[in-house]
Image: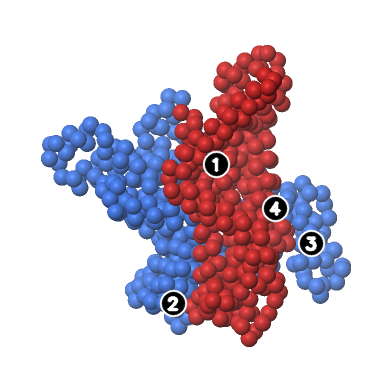
Amino acid sequence: MGAYIVKRLLQSILVLFGLSLLIFFIARVVPGDPARAALGNLATEEQVERLRAEMHLDKPFFVQYYYWLISVLHGDLGKSLYTQRPVTQDLVQFLPATLELMLFATLISLVVGQTMGVLSGYFRNSWFDGLFRVISYAGVATPPFVIAIFLLFIFSQLLGLAPGVGRLPITMAEPPRVTGFLLIDSLLAGRPDVTLVALKHMLLPAISLAIAHIAQEGRITRSSLIDVQQKDYILAHQVHGIRPTKVIFKYLLRPSIVPTVTVMGMDFAFLLSNAFLVEVVFMWPGFSRYAVNAMLSKDLNAIVAVVLVIGLTVALVNLLVDVTIAFLDPTVRIRRRGG
Amino acid sequence: MSSRKEAALAVWQARWKGLSRGWYRYSRNPLHVVGLVVLLLIGLAAGLAPYITPYPEHAGPYTNFREAGLPPSKAHWFGTDRVGRDVFTRVIFGYRFSLLLGIVVLSISVPIGVLFGLIAGYKRGSWIETVLMRVTDIFLSVPPLVLAMAVAAMLTPNLFNAMLAISISWWPWYSRLIYGMTVSLREQYFVRELELTGAGKLQILLREILPNCLGPLLTKVTLDMGFAILMGATLSFVGLGAQPPTPGLGTMVAEGAKRLPAEWWSTIFPALAIVVVILAFNLVGDGLRDVFAEEEV
């Protein structure tokens, strides 16, 4: 087990190293002078030259990359042209809002997806099963920003059931920042009313993020359930008069845990990129909206940092998923030990 | 009739038979046929957009503020946008750019990915495989949308660079697919036998292994047309793709969204147009999968 984790870790580091080389290369070959962009049009030629030397832009590509890598490993990702602050500081400020949203969306997709999967698998070929199939088709074919706009339009603007954009109404002050998670910070500040409002604001963006994943997770649970249902031991349980709910939760659902965790891991990357669009629509002050704004203002340091952070996060999540599966699935565990 | 002609005829008859059998399998699910019809209609409309749309001049930087923000009517089926352009016309032109984007992206990324996959799969166990597949892994280490957005942003955002950026993030998926198939095909007897008779590597790769990958490849290409269009729309939605006044479907959704809920038609119709085309490609792709899946049995 330990050797396996080390091997996966080394692979991830190698890939991340390659990713940094790739993204740094693209950032350097695109037309435009980063030093000139950093100083603006008013700077004199000498000032630009001095900054070019400071940023090592006058040296060959691999030397530039070396200096850049050293500073990245020291936690210095350069300065953002868009916010005029160190990129690291920006990331720390904007990441919690995105993480909170993604965790909430994952929770929704797990609960709703499992429930729908179980129901449509248990009542196979019923109207509910048909409805679920339609929803999962639509969930795959509809881009997240379209889902987000539809939800915002229908539930917030037409029906007035949900609040509009943002994490809190403009009139409401944010609680003092401790973790950056509004739900936690407001509770720490002793303001459960703020927690409730924040939760309401999070509902629509989280559902927009969750819909595609509800479909996917539900389908896996459904097919796994149908698969297991035909096994003899299930029939034996039923014949012995064990309650259906107990059969479902204790015997039918268990085999779907491993594929569900696998898919959650694979889907994490998509959840992350879908968050980009949902945050834009809901004006969510998170990491993804920061990233989009950095991209629109061609802020090279911030773009490179964003890509690296995402690469790192995806690698960590994949590692976590692989290790979890190795723990959950006895066949994987034994194969690893033997081989 | 010479025997040569007869043989040629027999080949064509066999092909026709295979084709009609394929169509039978495809058409068993009516949804697949609906998808195909919708796709043909969209393709036709997009191709003939300058001739069949009611106001072709509205596809560009046209303004007429007296007709701005009109709701759907007989004259303007999908209403007009904030500067008085016919939304229906712009949606059809949007399809034109979307399909163009899909075709360009796939014609760049499919050959590169296929080449990588074929070589890496055939050279299994050598350093060439390691290098090619590690490079593939690097491109797959961030979600394709993020990579495409970053690349499009670092180049100057426009339709052409969006195509380039999506292609850069797309080819590794083909590399993976073809790699897997090549690895299993090269162990088959017909490939082994050819190797023993001294057939060239190029011949084995292009004439034996590649044709056997075509079914799944075609299915994936069809499904990916939908996803490439989705990504193009996404890029133009955030402002990193087609720039106004080019009628990108995503651009139109983004511009219209500022006017929600009052002028809902300038957002909702382009948004539905995106969903329809992606759904259609998905249905056709599923149909093709059914056709090829059963042929393997």
Q: What's the coloring here? A: by chain
Residue drawn at 56 percent across, 21 percent down: B188
Single out the mark in the foreground, 1 or 3: 1
Looking at the picture, do discs 2 and 1 lie on one chain? no
B116 shown above or below A276? above
Q: Which residue is mark 3?
A: A32
Label 1 and label 3: CA atoms lie apart by 41 Å
Looking at the image, the residue that sits furthest to the bottom is B66
| Chain at tag 3 | A
Distance in Å between CA atoms under marks 4 and 3: 18 Å
Q: Depth-wise, is mark 2 or mark 1 nearer the camera?
A: 1
Whether callout 4 and callout 3 share a subunit is answered no
Query: Which badge, 4 or 1, is on the more N-terminal residue?
Result: 4
Coordinates of residue A222 in the picture (x, y in percent): 33, 45
Name the residue type under label 3. Gly
Which image quadrant is residue A250 in?
A: top left
Q: Which mark is residue B219?
A: 1
Q: Colour of chain B?
A: red
Q: Which residue is mark 2?
A: A157
The type of residue carrying mark 4 is Leu
Among the chains, which one is blue? A
* Measured Cα–Cα span from mark 2 to mark 4: 37 Å
Residue A76: % across, % down: 65, 58
Of pointers 3 and 2, the one earlier in the residue sequence: 3
Q: Quadrant of residue A12?
A: top right
Secondary element type, mark 1: helix
Residue A83 % position (x, y): 64, 70
